[in-house]
Amino acid sequence: MKTICCACKRTKVDEGWQRLVVESVKEVSHGFCPDCHRKAMLKIGEASHKWSGKSAGKGRNL
């Protein structure tokens, strides 16, 4: 089974993550490579911080 980053499309190989063309693979799993995971968590943290700063009476703006 090949694991492909859902953000940058790099493929996990034994020695790390590389940009590879994956053809004819029957089983593929999607996830985040370490770099994209870190970026996504930073964005989530920033959004959470902005959302938590809103007044309770104004509701949520998602």
Image (cartoon, rainbow, N blue to C red):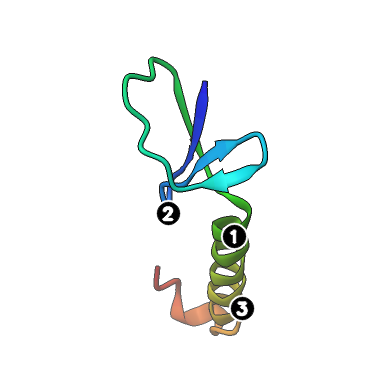
Residue type at tag 1: Asp
Would residue 8 appear left or right of 44 to someone viewing this image? Answer: left
In the rendered image, residue 21, in percent from the top left (x then y), is placed at 35, 37
**How many residues crowd mark 1 within 10 Å: few (<14), some (14–19), many (20+)?**
few
**Dot placed on the residue nearer the N-terminal end, 1 or 3:** 1
Of marks 1 and 3, the one in the foreground: 1
- On residue 8, the disc is 2
Disc 1: which residue: 35
Residue type at tag 2: Cys
Residue 38, image quadrant: bottom right
Q: Is residue 24 above or below residue 48?
A: above
- On residue 49, the disc is 3
Secondary structure of the residue carrying tag 2 is: loop
- On residue 47, the disc is none
In the rendered image, residue 3, in percent from the top left (x then y), is placed at 52, 33
Report the quarter where the C terminus lies.
bottom left
Secondary structure of the residue carrying tag 3 is: helix
Q: Are marks 2 and 1 in contact (CB under 8 Å)?
A: yes
Residue 46, image quadrant: bottom right
Would residue 55 appear left or right of 27 to someone viewing this image? Answer: right
Instruction: Find the distance from the CA under tag 2 to the CA under tag 1.
Output: 9 Å
**Residue sitting farthest toward the top:** 26
Q: Nearer the viewer, residue 55 or 40?
A: 40
Residue 42, image quadrant: bottom right
